């Protein structure tokens, strides 16, 4: 009986951990939206989104072509 309860608790813990991982999964990144949020919007603006790391940190480089 104790073994069944123990196995049940372990099973519930594993399912909970898997559900949390799904909730914390990284969403798709919209590069255009990020560039419009962080860079000055102008027709001469060149925005580049560099790949992120495992912590979800991204590097955005804004470069206005009028100001090289």
Image (spheres, rainbow, N blue to C red):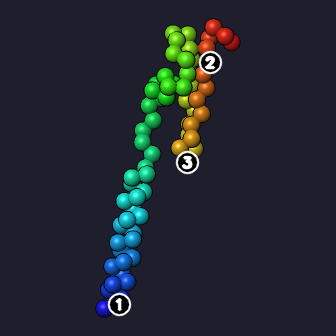
Above or below for 6 versus 20: below
Residue designated by label 1: 2
- Residue occupying the point 44% across, 31% down: 30
Q: Position of residue 18 (x, y in %)?
A: 39, 62
Is tag 1's residue or tag 2's residue first in the polypeptide sequence?
1
Q: Quadrant of residue 19?
A: bottom left
Residue 63's disc number: 2
Mark 1 lies on a secondary structure that is helix
Distance between mark 1 and mark 3 Cα atoms: 40 Å
Q: Position of residue 31 (x, y in %)?
A: 48, 29
Residue designated by label 3: 54
Above or below for 22 versus 52: below
Above or below for 23 versus 48: below
For label 2, count other residues whose C-alpha is less than 10 Å away and answer few (under 14), some (14-19) or many (20+). Answer: some
Mark 3 lies on a secondary structure that is loop
Q: Residue furthest right?
A: 68
Is tag 3's residue or tag 2's residue first in the polypeptide sequence?
3
- Residue occupying the point 42% across, 57% down: 21
Q: Is residue 42 left or right of residue 20?
A: right
- Residue occupying the point 63% across, 8% down: 66
Distance between mark 3 and mark 2 Cα atoms: 26 Å
Q: Position of residue 29 (x, y in %)?
A: 45, 35
Distance between mark 1 and mark 2 Cα atoms: 65 Å
Q: Residue furthest top?
A: 66
- Residue occupying the point 54% across, 26% down: 38
User: Comparing marks 1 and 3, which lies closer to the viewer?
Assistant: 1
Above or below for 52 versus 3: above
Q: Quadrant of residue 52?
A: top right
Q: Along the line of sight, which residue is nearer the eye, 46 or 41?
A: 41
* Cβ atoms at labels 1 and 2 below 8 Å apart: no
For label 3, count other residues whose C-alpha is less than 10 Å away and answer few (under 14), some (14-19) or many (20+). Answer: few
């Amino acid at each position: 009986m104790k073994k069944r309860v123990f196995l049940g608790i372990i099973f519930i813990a594993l399912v909970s951990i898997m559900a949390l991982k799904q909730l914390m999964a990284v969403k798709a990144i919209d590069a255009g939206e990020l560039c419009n949020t962080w860079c000055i919007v102008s027709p001469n603006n060149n925005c580049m989104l560099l790949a992120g790391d495992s912590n979800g940190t991204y590097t955005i480089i804004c470069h206005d072509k009028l100001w090289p």
